[in-house]
């Protein structure tokens, strides 16, 4: 097992080598619209996964995948020449989904912003249901003496003591 820092450094080097080789060594016109976005190497430095994006439609994506698969040997040879490891790692090319996910996320954010604006417009013209001040504060000054009978209020507090004594 290699050090993860060494694997990350090697992955960055492989990314640069593959990107340069696509422009220099591979003479296939289908790879012109490919951008290498990232590379990952396993900790044992035996396998490298290279992520790429393609500018264009679905046909361009499928053509680019076929071209990369065809040029895999040439690209691995370039990687072997330009890195200093005992064994040249195998290369695997994976279409990067970050641009697709980013556009989906942007669309969701636009939708959320639109809905927030609708709610804000509804809230601007809204009136509270019921009274303006639903939390009435009853102070002693507001209470009339006629509201209570003397029988309702027992201020002695002896009822509980009498009940305990009777038990």
Image: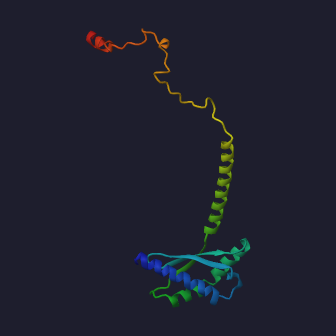
Identify the residue shown where x is 43% and y is 11%.
152
| Colour setup of the view | rainbow
Left or right position of 50 against 158: right
Height in image: 138 above or below 166? below
The residue furthest front is 141
Please tell me how many numbered marks the rendered image carries: 0
Height in image: 108 above or below 2? above
Which quarter shows the N terminus?
bottom left
Identify the residue shown where x is 72% and y is 71%.
58
Q: Position of residue 164 (x, y in %)?
A: 28, 14
The residue furthest left is 165
Kindly indicate the quadrant of the structure image that contains residue 111.
bottom right
Kindly indicate the quadrant of the structure image that contains residue 6.
bottom left
Q: Position of residue 121 (x, y in %)?
A: 69, 46
Q: Position of residue 11 (x, y in %)?
A: 50, 79
Residue 43 visible in the displayed image? yes
Q: Position of residue 69 (x, y in %)?
A: 63, 80
Kindly indicate the quadrant of the structure image that contains residue 71.
bottom right
Which quarter shows the C terminus?
top left
Identify the residue shown where x is 52% and y is 91%.
81
Between residues 9 and 46, which one lies in front from this camera angle?
Answer: 9
Between residues 150 and 100, which one lies in front from this camera angle?
Answer: 150
Between residues 114 and 61, which one lies in front from this camera angle?
Answer: 114
Between residues 35 and 3, which one lies in front from this camera angle?
Answer: 35
Residue 97 visible in the displayed image? no
Identify the residue shown where x is 67% and y is 43%.
124
């Amino acid at each position: 097992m290699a050090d993860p820092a060494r694997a990350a450094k090697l992955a960055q080097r492989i990314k640069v080598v593959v990107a340069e080789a696509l422009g220099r060594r591979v003479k296939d016109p289908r790879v012109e619209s490919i951008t290498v976005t990232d590379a990952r190497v396993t900790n044992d430095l035996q396998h490298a996964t290279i992520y790429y994006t393609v500018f264009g439609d679905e046909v361009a994506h499928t053509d680019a995948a076929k071209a990369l698969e065809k040029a895999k040997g040439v690209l691995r040879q370039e990687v072997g020449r330009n890195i200093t490891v005992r064994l040249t790692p195998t290369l695997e090319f994976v279409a990067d989904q970050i641009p697709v996910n980013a556009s989906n996320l942007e669309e969701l954010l636009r939708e959320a912003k639109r809905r927030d604006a609708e709610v804000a417009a509804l809230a601007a013209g809204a009136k509270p249901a019921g009274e303006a001040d639903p939390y009435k504060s009853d102070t002693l000054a507001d209470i009339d003496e006629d509201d209570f009978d003397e029988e309702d209020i027992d201020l002695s507090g002896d009822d509980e003591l009498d009940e305990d004594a009777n038990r």
